[in-house]
Image (cartoon, rainbow, N blue to C red):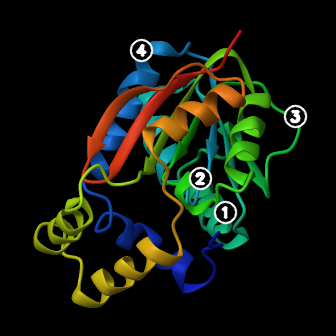
Amino acid sequence: MPTFTGDEALSYDKRIGKLVPGYELLHHTTAAQLSVTLDQDATILVIGAGTGKDIIELAKHNAGWQFIAQDISADMLAIADQNFTNLGLSDRVTIHLGPIKDAIYQADAALCLLVLHFVSDNGDKAELLKQIGLNLRAGGQLFLADLMQPDTDFERAAQLHYCQKELGLTDAGAQTMRHQFQEAFYPISGARLHELTSLTGFCSPSLYFKALGFSAHAIAKGQ
């Protein structure tokens, strides 16, 4: 799994919008669901919080929400921490460097956006979902967005075409992404996602977003 250190951390926010069709819509639709399902004083666990962009945007929706910003990259969280300080959000955010282990938090909702496809399906995906569940209250929602296995034999080509023609991805960037599809990502099918969530104490996933290879699901933790 990449750690996004150094220049990768510094350039992440500029790059990600060129790699994910519907990136802004994904975040807006996720935020809309949080807004209508959470209490005013809810706590949101953000897995792979990166530079804190998701938290900064969500903080605008509700002044009472608290956040847990988790990431395995110290460089990404250092950028996030500075961003939170600059915007006066530090008192609303708990920084968690490293994997989430055991039931140390009891969040009302969890976000895991564009993270799981970096994790191998050798037990590691299940372990991550299990740990999220342990830190999520019963009935709490996990909002999970990920690169999935393609539904057609031309979906990956269409995805790259869109990223280049509409989002400004360079030829070099497209070549890198082709390589990552083969070597660096671990996408799963919708059926496998159902298996993993069932095994780790979650209810059946409910699809709420899909765009050229990327899908997002709302998944309730079992009672």
**Mark 3–mark 4 distance (CA, rounded to whole Å):** 26 Å
1 or 4: tag closer to the N-terminus: 4
Q: Which mark is residue 77?
A: 1
Per the image, the residue denoted by label 3 is 104
Q: Are marks 2 and 1 in contact (CB under 8 Å)?
A: yes
Q: Position of residue 184 (x, y in %)?
A: 53, 74
Q: Is residue 108 above or below residue 163?
A: above
Tell me the crowding category of disc 1: few under 14, some 14 to 19, or many 20 or more residues within 10 angstroms, Cα based.
Answer: many
Q: Which quarter shows the N terminus?
A: bottom right
Q: Which mark is residue 49?
A: 2
Q: Residue at x 53, y 38 (%)?
A: 193
Q: Position of residue 216 (x, y in %)?
A: 40, 38
Q: Residue at x 64, y 26 (%)?
A: 198
Q: Secondary structure at mark 2?
A: loop
Per the image, the residue denoted by label 4 is 36
Q: Residue at x 73, y 69 (%)?
A: 74
**Mark 1–mark 3 distance (CA, rounded to whole Å):** 19 Å
Q: Secondary structure at mark 4?
A: helix
Q: Secondary structure at mark 3?
A: loop
